[in-house]
Image (tube, rainbow, N blue to C red):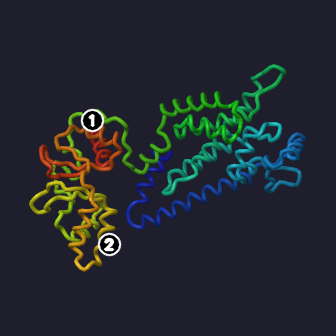
Amino acid sequence: VNGKFLGSQRRTHMAGPWMKQKRLVEMALVALFCSAVSVLLPALWPCRALTEAEQSALVDKGQRLSWKISTCPEGFVNEMASLTFQGQGTTLNNLFAVSDDMHFSVPTLLVYGLALFAIACVAVGTSAPGGAAGAILLCGAALGRAVGMVVRPWFDFPGNTQPHVRFFAVMGGAAASAGFFRLPLAVTAMVVEMTGDTAYVAPMFICCTIARVVADKISLSFINFLCQFNDYPLLKPSPPPSFRHHTAFDIMSELDKGVNFAPHMIGASDGIDHARRLLATKHHSFPVVRDRASDWTLQGLIVRRELAALVDKTSEAERPNHAFRQGLAADMKVSPPTVNEGMPAERVYAWFVSQGLRRLVVVQDGTMQVTGIITRHDLHEATLKWQAAA
């Protein structure tokens, strides 16, 4: 839903002028939609009377159970309002309650679970996604409890006992979260801590592992989806096959249609005015060379944040250029990671990812003459371009 339709619509209409204002309007509309669904569903849902078992459970366990009356008359409750008009913790307690204490009909659970899933799909693709973890846990718990209501009569344990629907709700919530975040062990530990029932550990871990395996086959994880949806440069652990016939020269940031432009850099003898010109660009790091006019031998690397702080600190000095040069020599990273132009792209990719680097300075083969910089975004763009060409 987000990737095929909402994502393309958002990129089409959210770009250009007034982008920040458009994002605020987008979030306001999404909040209005979510609120409208949460209010209208209970208003359209019928009321019902409490059973004797539910009334006695309210007396014994009233602090853990929470019914909502909404517009119902006295002595009646609204099942949908008891799920939507609550905080996430209270709703989860209601869904994890045994069926004798709180009975929710299958239509109520199905409509609530699917509506919550639709709300999560819309909200997670906004400019400020949030709250997905709780929504997915509640959605899985509601749908799991609905399944439990349907299949529970099929089980016949010794003594004519049947499994509690609480078991299905817990397994459903855990499986949905594990498939969503791809964290079966962490989700198992979290849900066991929430329920306080260690008897669920083994079946829950099996459910979470199956959910993880199935989800890997059919979709991206939540984090990977957000990276792809927002065009974040997410790199896989191993280089793609399309990198096999390329070199570092092919992927560095200054390469544009076969032409290698001079990188944005700063000389050891440059003054504060040139630093201000660099800060006016969108680059995040700048190689420091011996002489920008004649000798591009690498001396170090300074990131944008440190360069901006250095300009602010030295701009009021009596001799700002002299103070700036001294600060540059002290603040720059003296031995940044470098690669030769001819290094195979596969090795560049593998080293970049395995070391968790943010940038690589590219130098001429056999020398330390700077020719460019490779960033995570460059590797991501090269991956997309070369895979499309292949």
Residue at 45% x, 65% y is: 20
**Marks 2 and 1 in Cβ contact (< 8 Å):** no
**Label annotation for residue 164:** none
Q: Residues within 10 Å of mark 1 (few under 14, many from 20)?
A: some
Residue at 63% x, 31% y is: 204
Question: On the rendered image, what quadrant is the C terminus found in?
Answer: top left
Position in image of residue 7 (x %, y %): 45, 50
**Label annotation for residue 313:** 2
Distance of mark 2 from mark 1, alpha carbons?
Answer: 46 Å
Q: Nearer the viewer, residue 389 or 191?
A: 191
Q: In the image as oriented, which residue stretches furthest toward the left?
A: 294
Which amino acid type corresponds to the residue marked 1 in the rendered image?
Answer: Ser
Position in image of residue 44 (x %, y %): 74, 52
Q: Residues within 10 Å of mark 2 (few under 14, many from 20)?
A: some
Left or right: residue 89 versus residue 371 is: right
Q: Nearer the viewer, residue 75 or 340?
A: 340
Give whichever of discs 2 and 1 has the lower sequence position: 1
**Secondary-structure class at tag 2:** helix
Q: In the image as oriented, which residue stretches furthest toward the top?
A: 158
**Label annotation for residue 242:** 1
Which amino acid type corresponds to the residue marked 2 in the rendered image?
Answer: Lys
In the displayed structure, 165 sits above or below 385; it is above
Left or right: residue 315 versus residue 204 is: left
**Secondary-structure class at tag 1:** helix
In the displayed structure, 18 sits above or below 230; it is below
Label count reads: 2
- Nearer to us of marks 2 and 1 is 2
Position in image of residue 368 (x %, y %): 15, 50
Position in image of residue 301 (x %, y %): 25, 56
Residue at 73% x, 35% y is: 166
Left or right: residue 353 versus residue 348 is: right
- Quarter of image, res 194: top right
